[in-house]
Amino acid sequence: MANDTTTNRLAVAMIGLGHMGGHMCDHVTAAGHDVRAFDLSEVALDERVAAGATRATSPADAATGADMVGIVVINDAQVRAVLGGPDGVLAAARPGVVIAVHSTVNVEAIHEFAAMADAVGAHLIDAGISGGEVGSRAGTLVTMVGGEPGVVATARPVLETFSKEVVHAGPLGSGMALKIARNLVGYIMMTAVHEGMLLARASGVDLADLEHVLHETNMDAQVYAPFAFGGPEPLGADAPAEQRTFMAEVVALGEKDLDNALELSRTHGVSLPMTAETRRQFDAVMRSPRS
């Protein structure tokens, strides 16, 4: 349990009890909240009931009398189905209930869902989650929230049961935008690792050595360093001379190293499309304003 919140006991509906939602539900239950759980999988429901939750027969049944509803399904269409229809959350939601969409969905869809909730007097927030099943099981997710401050404050005691940190990113949609941006970085880094592995393998390098040096050379810090997260200064023509000199050095080194990688890929007949595109865009990316 990430945080004991029994002093603020709430009636909570948890809908979607898969690899993420099931463990989240268990943390909410263990924190002393009254949880009604629903999933199409009877096996998943049985596990949550064994952990102390009450079995619900539909999203509407789960949401009946709830102070807060957590939705942890796959995509926009599933969230829409959970919310709408005669058996949906909004058919039973009482005025003032807080609905947290944990699913990673389109930001436009968040505004659509919020309008649906508003029509019945409910409040919807986006509450994207990151940390995978390991974090869900441990109660150490990072939850990225968008919504009105008062509504987020109401939801926070529940969110904190399965989170090591709750980041209120701003108004409705901000949490989902933050989650999408985070995921974008992750998937592009996965592609970069894949291309690095292709090049190393084609060059006869043991992939265990590549993994080792990636870990041991603090790659994450090197990737983040040039971008000065949160800094107000642009990196364009008006940037301080010292900053422009530093960035010119980064660009020169980066272009040299990317050229070397592409030359080696041609030697071994390996296609590295993301590397080639990065080389084309690198100067513009590194010199563009950040603010």
Image (tube, rainbow, N blue to C red):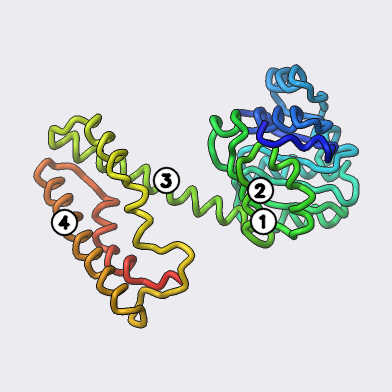
Which label number is shown at residue 146?
1
Q: Secondary structure at mark 1?
A: strand
Residue 286 % position (x, y): 32, 66
Identify the mark nearer the N-term, 3 or 4.
Answer: 3
Question: Mark 2 or 3, which is nearer the eye?
Answer: 2
Q: Residue at x 62, y 58 (%)?
A: 169
Q: Secondary structure at mark 2?
A: strand
Question: Mark 4 or 1, which is nearer the eye?
Answer: 1
Identify the mark nearer the N-term, 2 or 3.
Answer: 2
Quarter occupied by residue 253? bottom left
Identify the mark nearer the N-term, 4 or 1.
Answer: 1
Q: Residue at x 12, y 46 (%)?
A: 264
Which label number is shown at residue 184?
none
Q: Say which quadrant the N terminus sits in.
A: top right
Identify the mark nearer the N-term, 1 or 2.
Answer: 2
According to the picture, the residue beneath numbered tag 4 turns out to be 259
Q: Is the C-beta separation of discs 1 and 2 under 8 Å?
A: yes
Question: Mark 1 or 3, which is nearer the eye?
Answer: 1
Position of residue 138 in the picture relative to residue 229 (left or right):
right
Classify 139 as above or below 263: above
Position of residue 77 in the picture relative to residue 134 (left or right):
right
Cα gap from disc 2 to disc 4, whole angstroms: 41 Å
According to the picture, the residue beneath numbered tag 3 turns out to be 187
Q: Residue at x 16, y 56 (%)?
A: 259
Q: Identity of the amino acid at label 2?
A: Ala
According to the picture, the residue beneath numbered tag 2 turns out to be 127
Classify 265 as above or below 249: above
Q: Secondary structure at mark 3?
A: helix
